[in-house]
Amino acid sequence: MAEIPESAISERFLAGSGPGGQNVNKVATACQLRVDVYALGLPPDAFRRLKTLAGSKLTSEGGLVILARRFRTQEANRADARNRLSELIDAALTRPERRIKTKPSKAAKARRAEGKKARSAVKAMRGRVRGAE
């Protein structure tokens, strides 16, 4: 779990859609979490990955907006928003594995060529029959 400074986070509670019946119309249970990504102090490569992962949740001013309205209570939505934020930051901080280029072996190349020859022979036999008149 990534450590997120409280000074970088601001929360707002809104009237949310979703489960809750008539309670939805009366109580502001949805949580909108705004985070200043510059205040997180991420390394440049992690910041680039965060921009890609966040997509449209990232504003042009550098604010990350997460809206949580899955649950019926403020506390549950608040916890959900914070969990999603920390998962997003953790995903940005993990470096992807470097891909090691490989080449096909000589035997694999030979098998491929043999397969192509066999297929070619099958297709060559499909032509019109000539001669025998």
Image (cartoon, grey):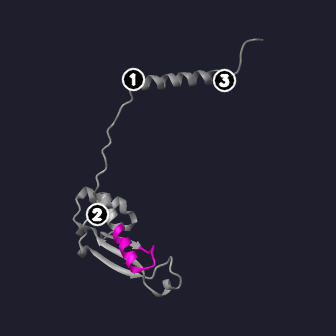
> Which marked residue is nearer to the observer: mark 3 or mark 1?
1
Range of the magenta residues? 68-83
> Which marked residue is nearer to the observer: mark 3 or mark 2?
2
Q: Are marks 3 and 2 in contact (CB under 8 Å)?
A: no
The local crowd at label 2, few if under 14, some if 14 to 19, many if 20 or more residues have their Cα within 10 Å, is: few
Dot placed on the residue nearer the N-terminal end, 3 or 2: 2
Q: Are marks 2 and 1 in contact (CB under 8 Å)?
A: no
> Which marked residue is nearer to the observer: mark 2 or mark 1?
2
The local crowd at label 3, few if under 14, some if 14 to 19, many if 20 or more residues have their Cα within 10 Å, is: few
Location of residue 65 by image quarter: bottom left
Q: Quadrant of the N terminus?
A: bottom left
User: x and y percent of residue 11 in the render?
Assistant: 33, 78
Residue carrying label 1: 106
Q: Amino acid at mark 1?
A: Lys
Q: Main secondary structure of the magenta part?
A: helix
Q: Amino acid at mark 3?
A: Arg
User: x and y percent of residue 50 in the render?
Assistant: 32, 61
Q: Of helix, strand and loop, which one carries label 3?
A: loop
Residue carrying label 2: 1
